[in-house]
Image (cartoon, coloured by chain):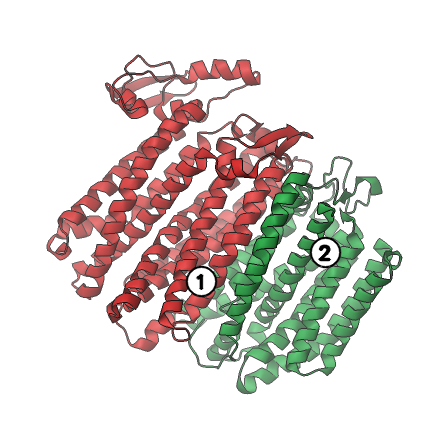
Chain colours: A green, B red
Amino acid sequence: MDLHVVWFVLITVLFAGFFFLEGFDYGVGMWLPFLGKSDAERRAIINAIGPVWDGNEVWMITAGGAMFAAFPHWYATLFSGFYLALFLMLLALILRGVAFEYRSLHEDSGWRTRWDWAIFFGSAVPAFLWGVAVANLIRGVPIDAHMQYTGTFWTLLNPYGLLGGLAAVAVFLVHGGHFLALKIEGELAARPRRAAHAAWWPAVVALVLFVLGLFGYRGYLDKGALALLVALVAAVAFVAVRFLGDRAAFWSGGFAIVLATVTVFVALFPNVMPSTLNPDWSLTIYNASASNYTLGVMTVVALVFTPLVLLYQGWTYWVFRSRVRVGEGGY
Amino acid sequence: MSEVALARLQFATTTTFHFFFVPLTLGLVILVAIMETLYVVRGDEKYKRMAKFWGTLFLINFAIGVATGLVQEFQFGMNWSEYSRFMGDIFGVPLAIEALLAFFMESTFIGVWAFSWDKLPKKLHAALIWLVALGSNLSAFWILVANSFMQRPTGYVLRNGRAELESFVAIATNPNVFYQFTHVFFAGLSTGAFVVMGISAWHLLRRREVAEFAASMKIGVIAALVGSIMVATVGHFQAQYIIHEQPMKFAAMEGVWEDTPDPAPWSLFAIIDENRQENPVNIEIPYLGSLLSYNKLSGSITGMKTIQREYEAKYGPGNYIPPVKWTYWSFRVMVLVGGLMILLALWGLALWGRFETSRAFLVSSIWMIASPFIANSTGWWVAEIGRQPWIVQGLLKTSEAVTPASVVPAGTVLLSLIGFNLLYLVLGLIDLGLMIKYAQRPMREPEEAGDEALAY
């Protein structure tokens, strides 16, 4: 088996897990200031993701580490090229991580309001920027013959990039809304449900445009029947979200996010960073990769530990399976 | 400033800041786990209160350690893309393993632990904090596997214009890891111990909750004894290892320009002139240099000028001498502070069970909270600054590792440097304020307030 393909698949899995799990964390964070009318309600909203957000974020860190190990040139070109975008994302994520832990440590409404907004921006900025980044991977960015990015920060903020950002924000708002509706007890649960429904329309519009772009930029129609089926099922699953109950809607939306991630990676394959300057200068799973030996070592590690991680992370969701009550302790 | 200088400054400041919190995480989690285990074994509610109290401080510290660790994961790609290309085949491996094997474990279980005091059986809950302890220390191990390659490359082959992995076992069992990880592990334990001792002392000085804080002090003193003595012992052998593996770093640590006479003296205080490559003032203790370097009263230390000539012959023209003042003084401050830490731990042992009787000990303990943080930072500087101009010893220079200025210009690095440092400054002050606030709170409060504190 071609280890380059294996690692391309594994990184797809990591990003799919990341967008599914942090997708609802970002959504919940973005809804926080708008859905929680009182401090007790806002605490309940944060508590819905309180025990799990940290573990969810590791999916992104692992994806970054896996890119470094399996496709060092991809890691180097992407993160040096998207420097300012990543810088802003890191500032936002640092603020968000600290905000969750610190907001309730001080009895002061001004203090807590400030941290709540830190959570909002700490969720909205990464959600938006991941959308921008993924859209630009699909669209292609200027990369020269030496694998160096030759654009600037503003290159990324093209219409398709911005569309990707908005699509990500809207989809995560829907996803996070359904998660909250599932996790919160009592009448507060109705609010995120309505909010998720409200965000559904913009999400659908942005997604349709995004997929059209994907078809255009990457010639998706030539990728084969199975690839088309994946994209189609993703679309159906996301459309269905509007018509299902909370639990089914959450899972259907999450399924759509996973399949959409797969669609994006299928569209890229076998490129990881297409160049707009010359197709021959694109980074591919072959010219960007680590040695076969490293890929082999990493494959063994991933095959042993990924199931273990899934197992114990699944267990944590089981421990906290009950709904969160307003007025409980926690964050 | 050049792009390299700015990128270095950013890496140095963000890493030092990150490493300010990490050792406390590594050590304090073990002490909290011991307290909770005592609670499970002895069934004494005192230990549960202790685990919750110190657990709250642990969580405040953990949050900022994790948040600042995010930058570490990505800034190799951002600022050191040429390093990432040259080293990714090797360096990415321990980094990815760290995330998959260790960081997932610690981040997942800390969330469960903080939220499940009343949800899970006692034994299972205690097991969770041990898993966090295991995860965070494993995490340190894999990060140091990565760093050890930079100090002493092994298990690689130069191919396709980069370093490629030839033996995973060789990089994971790099002898340098043995010294470095053990050193950092016991440094972490000492950091947890001195924080526990200092804060307990503050309460004991005020005769507050003497049973709880005296018990905390006992655990702190034992951990401080083990930690500070072991960190010094390992450090001693580590320095002897460095003599062979990184002689230039060692000579800089000792401020030795010319080969020393045999037996070698040990420099206690030197004024170093890096331009003229000499020490105009140098107060030395005879024999001690040989004793520390070779465990005997003879043997000379090779000077930086000699090694410079060897390296020029081996690697071509260039300056192979690291910033000597930084290396020399960082090393001395670390050793001095480490010595004071051992003394305080011994003093605590002498006062065993009657800590409250010595006001001087309690006051010293409070002041000494700062000591592990100083020793940790200076120790890390010795390791990293002493390796310069290399980013990977003998293989790649720092100046060749930076992202090309055409991709990330100096102005952009300056922007992120200022941005990260401003954010870190603000968060650092907030963290300090919260630590002080929660360190001064009593353990026995109405149960509700206690829970609230623990779960944020």
Determine whether B83 is above or below A199 in the image: above
SS class of the residue under badge 1?
Answer: helix
Q: Please give the name of the residue rendered at 49% of the width and 68% of the height, measured from the top-left corner.
A: A51
Residue B394 in view here: yes
Question: Chain for mark 1?
Answer: B
Disc number lying in front (1 or 2): 1
| x and y, in percent, of residue A27 in the image | 62, 69
Q: Is residue A249 left or right of residue A317?
A: right
Name the mark on residue B110. Answer: 1
Residue occupied by mark 2:
A134
| x and y, in percent, of residue B403 in the image | 63, 37
Residue closest to the eye, B190 or A227: A227
| x and y, in percent, of residue A322 in the image | 51, 79
Q: Amino acid at mark 1?
A: Ile
Question: Chain for mark 2?
Answer: A
Figure quadrant of residue B438:
bottom left
Residue closest to the eye, B415 or B351: B351
SS class of the residue under badge 2?
Answer: helix
Q: Please give the name of the residue rendered at 43% of the width and 59% of the height, measured from the top-left corner.
A: B131
| x and y, in percent, of residue A220 in the image | 85, 58
Q: Please give the name of the residue rendered at 17% of the width and 62% of the height, measured from the top-left corner.
A: B206
Q: Residues within 10 Å of mark 1 (few under 14, many from 20)?
A: many
Name the mark on residue A10. Answer: none
Residue that protrudes farthest toward the bottom in the picture:
A187
